[in-house]
Image (cartoon, grey):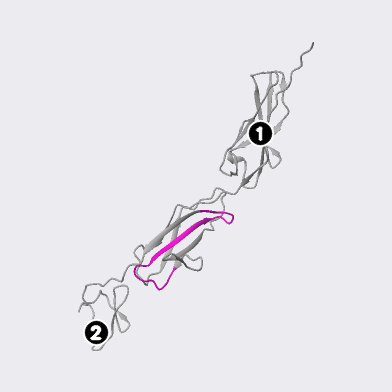
Amino acid sequence: VTVVNTRPVVGTVLIRPLGESFTNDDLTCDAQDVRDPDGHQDLSYAYSWSVNDEGVADVDGPTLTADHFVRGDRVVCSVVVSDPFGPSDPAQSEERVIANSAPSILSASIGPQSPRPNDELVCGYEGFSDADDDADQSRIQWFINDEPVDGEIDALSADFEAGDEVICEVTAYDGVDEGQVRRGRVTIQPHTVLDATIDCVSPGLGAMLTLNDDGQVDIEGQISETFALTS
């Protein structure tokens, strides 16, 4: 009686992590439900990878590092399991398409930090990052007292009132997907009454004196070197 070896059998092959994969993910090939009908325990595993139907020549292990693919690439892994007498048929994973990586930003802020009612507010943000190296197309939305302001603008001038809460909301965007949202927030401060004297100008009789928003004195259209007013 001749006893013939029965080759191992691979149930399924998975690419991990499960779900979507991105350009900064390392992928792992995982053979599931491997059986050897003859009960051999000393099984060996051989792995191969393909990207867009082209074999990856420099990888023969279970891990494909992220530098081997970009967004939109199609990745497949195959496994052959061998016992001491021969290999199994190749088993192949389902195709994994590399997804777009959503961008991120670190922070958003509004300047000036203690604005007055007539100030122009500027929204800024820092730390845009995108794993696919997509261009920064982040979006800005302003709110005044929780009411949205029309238009995606980075500078805002409005008829602010003291006590208004102004928010700039920045959404990281790469042209494909939106990412993190960061907010800057300020409260409009009341005008400041300065306590100083006019000692560098000599207005004529009946001249119009005006204290402007910068704390300077305007005398008939001529800006003085100073300061402010006292009675």
Residue at 29% from the left image edge and 75% from the top image edge:
216
Residue type pointed to by label 2: Pro
Residue toward you, 227 or 143:
143
The percent coordinates of residue 144 (x first, y second) are 42, 67
Judge depth for marks 2 and 1 and give the one in front.
Answer: 1
- Say above or below: 49 vs 71: above
Percent of width and height locating residue 98:
62, 45
Give the SS element for disc 2. Answer: loop
* Residue 91 on image: x %, y %: 70, 32
First to last magenta residue range: 156-179
Q: Is residue 8 left or right of residue 149?
A: right
Q: Indicate the quadrant where residue 23 lies.
A: top right
Q: Using residue 63 as the reference point, say whether residue 141 is left or right of it.
A: left
Up the image or down, 202 lies above or below 78; here it is: below
In the picture provided, is 21 more to the left or to the right than 181? Answer: right
Residue underneath mark 2: 203
Secondary structure at badge 1 equals strand
Query: Per the image, is 18 magenta?
Result: no
Q: Which of 95/54 is in front?
A: 95
Structural distance between the alpha carbons of marks 2 and 1: 90 Å
Residue 8 lies left or right of residue 30; in this view the side is right
Q: Which residue is mark 1?
A: 13
Dot 2 alpha-carbon crowd within 10 angstroms: few under 14, some 14 to 19, many 20 or more:
few
Q: Furthest-bottom residue in view?
A: 206
Q: Quadrant of residue 70?
A: top right
Asked whether disc 2 touches disc 1, contact meaning CB atoms under 8 Å apart, the reply is no
Q: Quadrant of residue 1?
A: top right
Q: Earlier in the sequence, mark 2 or mark 1?
A: 1
